[in-house]
Image (tube, grey):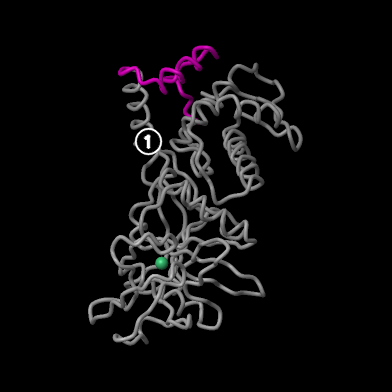
Amino acid sequence: MLIAQTEQSSPVQAINAHRKKSYFCPSCREQVTLKRGSRMVAHFAHRPNSSCQPFSESESQAHLTGKWQLADYFGEGNVELEPYIKTLAQRPDLLLKRDGRKMAVEYQCSPISVGKLQQRSQGYNSYGMEVVWILGENYLQKITSVRHAEKWLQYSYKLGWYIIFWQTHQPCLIIWHHLTVDGAGFLQGWAKTSTGNQSVKRPQSTVKSLKKQLQRQVQMGLHYKIPKWLKMQQFCYEHHSLLQAMPQVCYQFTDAEPLICGSPIIWAALMTVLLMEKPVSSLIRQLDLEKWAAKISTHFEGSQLIQCTTQELVNSWGRQLRRYVDLLEQQGILKAFDEKSWQLVALPR
Ligand SMILES: [Zn+2]
């Protein structure tokens, strides 16, 4: 922690502390040790074996550095460093005050479980406080697929799906925004920094290599009788199709919403299996699409998008179905009939 208290409970920053005085944890009131040297960020630490809850995680130098830099970035008058919220027994890294609202900022450098993350977020929410998670730069390399990103993904109208990072070695915010999922299940989108650089996170594979890769995955899955693939194949049989006979159009289903862990192409393939049961010229309604998506959902592991509201999830599914329909329209398979129904004009090949 960067701030401890004197015997009289007044807050003191580690950089201004005196070596000969005693300081105490604002939460548990145990005496803490001042750690200050030329090679480290000045901070206070609990003694070994301390059972203090809100301050129990040992803090890395990167975490301490980032916290200082973030406080500086947001501006001294707008933030409170490490405020201890007694009723919650929680202590956000920063408390941001903006337009009369208070927002907890957590700077996360170490791994954290979905359960613990959810618990901490809910704590703040129950206190009527929003929370923003900012990830350490070590996460930049680690987050490549939906599985790594699911618990951090947030949605806004302006940024689409996004994740925020703070980089310490050249201090700046990095925002990955308008994130979508490529055919193989990897994240792609845009990255911008608070210093103004814009770059692109590119898709990892081309349609051709993707096709090869997925066909091999299906082949191996069936050969080694992996339950997930056997179940999918069973589903295809029941609907007069085969996993190996996935129509070409499915391989173009990318830029998907991060709703499932895995390839959106397989999702599109199972949707298409159901579509192909319809005779040409039948009318496909929005409701049909929703039913199909619900029906095939048991074959996919849904993402744990714990930073989003139920409404945001519903909207995301809406966009996913819309994107699927758009692709079929572009390929001349569906033709818009009215706003919520389409005519099947040709079967996908
Ligand atoms: Zn303590």
Q: Judging from the image, what secondary structure is the residue with disc 1 in?
A: helix
Name the spot of residue 36 as percent of width and height, x first: 27, 80
Residue stretch rendered in magenta on the structure: 223-249
Q: Quadrant of residue 231?
A: top left
Q: Is residue 292 left or right of residue 144?
A: right
Mark 1 sits on what residue?
A: 210
Q: Is residue 47 left or right of residue 152?
A: left
Name the spot of residue 230 as percent of width and height, x first: 41, 17
Q: Quadrant of the N terminus?
A: bottom left
Q: Is residue 263 magenta?
A: no
Q: Main secondary structure of the magenta part?
A: helix
- Residue appearing at x 41%, y 55% in the figure: 201
Name the spot of residue 328 as percent of width and height, x first: 59, 33
Image height check: is 145 above or below 219?
below
Residue type indicated by callout 1: Leu
- Residue appearing at x 49%, y 48% in the figure: 180
Of the pair 10 and 128, the residue shown nearer to us: 10
- Residue appearing at x 45%, y 17% in the figure: 233
Q: Is residue 230 magenta?
A: yes
